[in-house]
Image: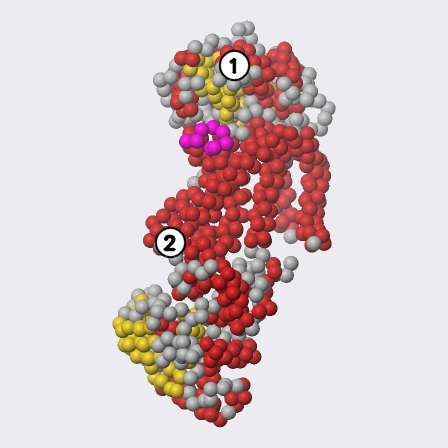
Amino acid sequence: MDRGVAIALEGVHRTFRAEAGGEVPALAGIDLSVTPGDFVALLGPSGCGKSTLLRLVAGLDRPERGAVRIESAHIGMVFQDAHLLPWRDVLGNVALPLELLGRDAAVRRARAEAAIAQVGLADAARRYPAELSGGMKMRASLARALVTEPRLLLLDEPFAALDELTRMALDDELRRVWRAAGLTVLFVTHSIAEAAYLAERVVVLSRRPGRIVLDHRVGLPAERTAALRADAAFAHETGVLQDALRRGGALA
Amino acid sequence: MNRAALARIAPPLLTFVVGTALAEVVIRILDVSPLLLPRPSAVWTAATSEAGVLLASLAATGGAVLLGLLLSSTIGVAAAVALAASPWVQRAFYPYAIFFQIVPIVAIAPLLVIWFGYGPRAVVAAAAVVSVFPVIANTLAGLLSVDPNLADLFRLHGATRVATLWKLRLPWALPQLLTGLRIAAGLAVIGAIVGEFVGGGGLGIVVLAAMRQQRTDLVFAAIGYASLLGLALFGAVGLASRLALRHWHASEAKR
Amino acid sequence: MRRAWLAALAAFALFACERDDATLELALNWKPEPEFGGIFEAERLGAFEKRGLSVERTGGPGAPVVQMVTAKQVTFGIASADEVVLARDRGSDVVAVFATYQTCPQGLMTHVARGIDTLAALLAAPGTLAVEPGLPYVKFLEQRYGFGALRVVPYTYSITPFLRDPSFTQQVFVTAEPIAARRAGAEPKVFLVADSGYDPYTAVVITHGDTLRSDAARVARFVEALREGWASYLADPAPANARMGPLNPEMDAEAFRLAAEAQRPLIEVANGAVGSMTEERWAELAEQLTALGLVKEAQPPERYFANPESLRAAGAPHGRDGSRRR
């Protein structure tokens, strides 16, 4: 059932040139190994380089030092904003990755409709982004990420801009999709509660330049429900993560 | 739809009617010479009694404007795409694009006639020259403002540069492009008329001949026709804009 | 609020008020050239001061002289007789007081090499004709001869297109472009429009009817000063040419000399004073413009002009047509 890919980051450094001159080190030596099918949360304060890490994994960026080893596979990516093309309807947006890969129209349509159904957006397939709520746009973005049946799903604080109820609904949606498809998920967040609720494993990064402060397997059941958030075990997990953040200088 | 259309047209129509009535009264009371400022009624008489000549001239000028706009929008978009390709290209060539904005058309119209000969070709060239820069500037701004995350998404899925241009960057720049076109339309009318002063034909010649013959009322009538042309173009671009962008905005979607 | 009203009132007054009595403004309709030689000579001789007049020159190429005189922004202006007839037909009360050119110096110029001998042949032949749009004499020629295969284009005051195109014809002032063309190496063949029967007075000094009625004596003195200037200029153009030279860098001394020579026969009056006009000429012009459809109704010829003799004699109302139009 584990269709996901393995990821290996070895001694990864990434430094940016600042506009005013000088250098900004974003990542200072990251060693990370992700097993196929794992759900990993990257937790850290703003500017700690977690988005940079995600982009390195996606292949959108290259490290100056070190290596990113990942099997060649379809990758799906979801950003903080849904980033849908306003001139296409939901179906057209979701089908976009397949279009770019050159699949023919019939295949595109079938797979897009399946992905839209998968995220519970079937009624809105013909609607345009301007007519959708924030939550629906994010579902569409998720469907777009899933349409190529990827083996790796990368998410960069996707639910941060949504209201709490929608966020909770989408959290559950995401875990459901993950469990059904068995792909590897890398989820960037600055929310301790979200990291604990969603992930199997949480990697805590320090303040810039980002280093791994904690690599922690979450001790919570596989079935995550809303009631879990009130649990003592949940509080324990968030406590551990909060500690790690403090050590990494996040709460200083 | 009827009520909405009425609400849109009624106010400017009202100001027009009140304005011209006021002008008519004031000009009569002050007894201003028709050589200096003709009464609106005199302008109306000229506009209707010479409608044949004016309409024919309007058609000539309008045709040149449309061709000129076709040229400037095609060249403008192509130039914007080329400039957006790399910061180096932009730095090297954009300053020269600005030349088209600042060069006074009155000065280069005679050059255009030398190069393209008398007649419609020089007029089309004049219309194109004055209207190309807004298209370049606005389209370029649109192309450069593409959402970087979307650009990343396209890269992630291995899109070619052409695919990214067609499916992302040009559609993304469309609102700005249409804004540029709206500005270009008005400028093209000016450019065409100035071109006609030197190259011949159309409303430009009607204006010159009317001035030579002390027909200030006809000058105003010709200007009125030219304004209608500008208005029509403006409206056409606005319509195209609303159609093309109807899905973009929540407010448009409600209609 | 009060300041705004005062400002508006002041602007209105500025726009509507009469000229200051002390200075007389004369608006030219072109650059300083031998066609204005008499004016500059009168200035040089002090002809205006002698008669108690203070004259200021203004205007230039493209100046809307007829409008300026109609609005009384200037006292006098230079226009052509057909402009006077047209303006009066539109309701403007402008009147001519001095006609520099007895014979109209407008013409058409083409290349000798084409072997064309008559205006009729010229206009029947194919080629390009560059004229200012709307010129009455162009309409006259078109009506009389027809333009056949000619392509009519705007004239933009440059002889370059003429020099480059062997089948080009353009409008000219016989004292100007043909001389320049010859000096540029071309062989121009010039046809005088006057020879075809259309012959308006040209470089005419105009003024407002109200000025004539209220100040006939001063206008008469102005015209006499002009006559003095022209008589002197015709005798010897060199000094006035030297004064005009720096004001018109496009023409050199030789061009001034040649132009002054060429215009002499067009200005001199056989038995009469320079600048005087006749009713017959004005009547004919008004009739021609009516026939061309450029004018709704010809006015009685005496409305169009006034010679200084009549001004001195009557001392009074001239050309009043009863209406209140300015």
Extreme bottom residue here?
A232
Q: Nearer the viewer, residue C284 or A94?
A: A94
- CA gap between label 1 and label 2 equals 57 Å
Q: Nearer the viewer, residue B36 or A82?
A: A82
Secondary structure under tag 2 reads: helix
User: In the image, residue A120 lies at what x, y percent?
Assistant: 56, 73
Return the residue at label 1: C124
Q: How is the image coloured?
A: secondary structure
Extreme top residue here?
C271
User: What amino acid type is highlighted by mark number 1?
Assistant: Ala
Q: Is residue B1 left or right of residue C102?
A: right
User: What amino acid type is highlighted by mark number 2?
Assistant: Ala
Asked if marks 1 and 2 fall on the same chain, the answer is no
The residue drawn where x is 45% and y is 61% is A103
Q: Nearer the viewer, residue B116 or B194?
A: B116
- The quadrant in which the N terminus of chain B is found is bottom right
Q: Is residue B150 left or right of residue A127?
A: left
Return the residue at label 2: B85
Subunit of mark 2?
Answer: B
The residue drawn where x is 51% and y is 88% is A228
Secondary structure under tag 1 reads: helix
Q: Main secondary structure of the magenta part?
A: helix
User: In the image, residue B207 lies at what x, y percent?
Assistant: 57, 31
Extreme left residue here?
A65
Magenta stretch in the rendered image: B115-122
Q: Are marks 1 and 2 in contact (CB under 8 Å)?
A: no
- The quadrant in which the C terminus of chain B is found is bottom right
